Image (cartoon, coloured by chain):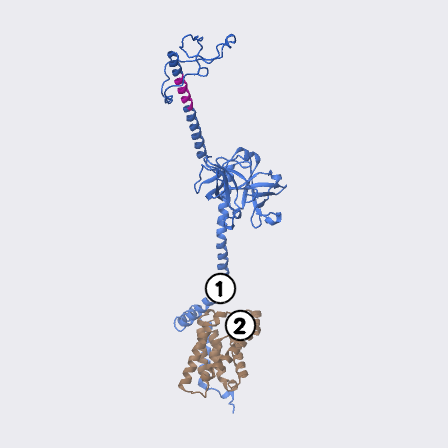
Chain colours: A brown, B blue
């Protein structure tokens, strides 16, 4: 991967993190787009699993610093999601938008499942409702947004571009 | 060719991933104080710009959410501001009404006033408000021709009475007439509506003012009480200017009424007994009217005293003249002759003439003698302070 493409990827990565803390609070909906997961997945398919796990751990640590009550849960979830995304990139990483959409969907849903389960913030019924209703909705939104960003940012991140 | 998932990543990646997972699990079981310390450290370093971004986004969202409510609040404040002026006016009107009620003290009714369209009554003066309805009627003691007034002055009179409502004829009605005067009662006239152009709508005119009397602009005109309907000293209007008329012996003045029909909200109806008792002191303050009455009374007493003194002085002068003439023998008595002498001595003879019969002395009175015309004009009456001369 060239230096220029790397820098473009880093800029895109930073931009997604900024969007997570600037655009997401504007809506404050129960099911909203998770730009951090999108950033992690986009970065994970371009690095080694170990690096993807580290990126996920750091992103999770950033999320946990704003929610000390579940400190460690986001780090654990993002570490696992990042490692898994990088480990499975040959399966999902392709020029197939529906496949990429499913990639984003699965990654967000998996994060919510791990985060809510490990964090233990919701009782049984609400946890089930969250995992079966709101998390899939959030995952769908995240998937749609991820695909849109992927299409828009393809000229910047395409492996064939300099 | 697709590589198998098992061969993705080296053992180092696995070790790193496992280490990070263990570290995350360790963070889950750390004491709260330690977790808070680590979290604070992250927030104060890498999290500063992100927290600021999130804070701005939260503020923006709050502003967007409150924009509608803020707009509604601003709109309602604007509407309330528009109503404030009307509320202040109504408040002032009610205060004036309370003051009038306190000064009248008895014999009146307070009623709200509603206008009915003139064309509903078939009134010819279309477009002008000439009548209004009151929510009090005969059951409350309203009688026909009762005067109706607002705190500022005359409104009209009751035209017809129903058990619970009354119809009032405003001063703008073409049949309205009112005997009016100035506060010092010097000038009298008749007030009627001024049927002029639109800019003079609802104005009044005071006609029949004697030509020798003039009214200054701004003079307040009051009812005179002479008509029997309105008590005296109720404000009617203010002089605006003199109107040109064909009458050469009287003046007509344009008046601005004290009360505009559009400003009438609540009125007072005087009962007949209250109107008969008068309302002096209600609009014109009591000390002014009492002082005026005292001054007028003093003026009349002085005039009477001067007249009496002049009459006494004139009588004394006449007496002196008579005495002097009698002494000089120039008096000729014109008293009727006794019946036996009526035929011969009818013609008066000059006193002192030879052969003339000197008449019997009669008590001299100013009414019974005719002195000779004096050679010089009769002197003016002495001042009242002069002592009457002694009779000779």
Q: Is residue B311 magenta?
A: yes
Mark toward the viewer: 1 or 2: 1
**Main secondary structure type of the part rendered in magenta:** helix
Disc 2 is attached to a residue of which chain? A
Disc 1 is attached to a residue of which chain? B
Please give the name of the residue rendered at 50% of the width and 36% of the height, measured from the top-left corner.
Answer: B224
Please give the name of the residue rendered at 42% of the width and 81% of the height, measured from the top-left corner.
Answer: A10
Asked whether the viewer can see residue B174, the reply is yes
Please give the name of the residue rendered at 57% of the width and 74% of the height, measured from the top-left corner.
Answer: A132
Q: Quadrant of residue B304?
A: top left
Asked whether the viewer can see residue B31, the reply is no
Find residue B5 and report its horizontal and vertical position in percent.
Answer: 51, 87
Find residue B24 and report its horizontal and vertical position in percent.
Answer: 46, 76
In the picture as drawn, the residue positioned furthest to the front comes out as B354
Secondary-structure class at tag 2: loop
**Vertical order, B385 against B169 (above or below):** above
Query: Which residue is label 2 attached to?
Result: A31
What is the number of the mark on residue B109? none
In this view, the residue in front, A69 or B285, is: B285
Find residue A22 and report its horizontal and vertical position in percent.
Answer: 45, 72
In the picture as drawn, the residue positioned furthest to the bottom comes out as B1
Query: Which residue is label 1 attached to?
Result: B67
Callout 1: few (<14), some (14-19), or many (20+) C-alpha neighbours within 10 Å? few
Magenta part of the chain? B307-318
Find residue B171 and report its horizontal and vertical position in percent.
Answer: 54, 43
């Amino acid at each position: 991967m060239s230096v220029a493409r790397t820098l473009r990827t880093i800029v895109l990565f930073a931009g997604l993190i900024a969007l997570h803390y600037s655009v997401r609070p504007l809506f404050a909906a129960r099911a909203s787009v998770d730009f951090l997961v999108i950033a992690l997945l986009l970065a994970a398919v371009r690095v080694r699993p170990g690096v993807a796990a580290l990126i996920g751990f750091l992103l999770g640590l950033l999320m946990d610093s704003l929610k000390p009550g579940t400190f460690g849960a986001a780090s654990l979830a993002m570490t696992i999601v990042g490692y898994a995304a990088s480990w499975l990139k040959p399966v999902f990483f392709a020029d197939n938008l529906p496949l990429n959409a499913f990639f984003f969907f699965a990654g967000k849903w998996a994060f919510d499942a791990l985060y809510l389960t490990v964090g233990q913030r919701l009782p049984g019924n609400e946890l089930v409702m969250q995992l079966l209703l709101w998390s899939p909705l959030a995952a769908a939104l995240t998937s749609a947004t991820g695909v849109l960003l992927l299409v828009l940012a393809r000229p910047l991140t395409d492996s064939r571009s300099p | 060719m697709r590589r198998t998932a098992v061969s993705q990543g080296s053992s180092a990646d696995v070790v790193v991933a496992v280490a990070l997972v263990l570290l995350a699990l360790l963070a889950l079981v750390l004491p709260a104080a330690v977790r808070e310390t680590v979290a604070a450290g992250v927030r104060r370093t890498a999290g500063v710009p992100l927290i600021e971004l999130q804070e701005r986004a939260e503020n923006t969202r709050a502003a967007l959410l409150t924009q509608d409510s803020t707009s509604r609040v601003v709109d309602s404040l604007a509407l309330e501001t528009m109503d404030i002026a009307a509320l202040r006016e109504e408040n002032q009107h009610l205060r004036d009404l309370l003051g009038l009620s306190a000064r009248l003290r008895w014999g009146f009714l307070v009623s709200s006033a509603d206008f009915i369209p003139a064309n509903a009554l078939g009134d010819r003066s279309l477009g002008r408000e000439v009548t209004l309805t009151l929510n009090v009627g005969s059951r409350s003691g309203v009688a026909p021709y009762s005067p109706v007034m607002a705190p500022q002055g005359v409104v009209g009179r009751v035209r017809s009475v129903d058990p619970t409502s009354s119809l009032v004829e405003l001063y703008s009605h073409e049949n309205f007439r009112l005997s009016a005067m100035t506060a010092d009662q010097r000038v009298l006239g008749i007030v009627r509506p001024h049927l002029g152009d639109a800019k003079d709508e609802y104005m009044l005119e005071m006609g029949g003012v004697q030509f020798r009397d003039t009214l200054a602009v701004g003079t307040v005109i009051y009812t005179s009480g002479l008509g029997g309907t309105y008590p005296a000293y109720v404000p009617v209007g203010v002089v605006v200017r003199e109107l040109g008329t064909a009458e050469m012996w009287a003046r007509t003045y344009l008046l601005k009424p004290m009360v505009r029909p559009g400003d009438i909200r609540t009125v007072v109806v005087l009962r007949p007994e209250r109107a008969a008792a008068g309302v002096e002191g209600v609009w014109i303050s009591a000390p002014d009217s009492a002082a005026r009455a005292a001054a007028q009374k003093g003026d009349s007493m002085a005039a009477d005293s001067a007249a009496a003194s002049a009459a006494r002085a004139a009588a004394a002068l006449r007496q002196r003249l008579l005495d002097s003439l009698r002494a000089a023998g120039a008096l000729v008595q014109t008293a009727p002759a006794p019946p036996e002498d009526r035929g011969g001595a009818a013609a008066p003879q000059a006193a002192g003439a030879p052969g003339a019969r000197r008449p019997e002395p009669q008590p001299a009175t100013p009414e019974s003698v005719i002195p000779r015309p004096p050679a010089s004009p009769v002197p003016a009456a002495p001042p009242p302070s002069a002592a009457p001369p002694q009779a000779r």
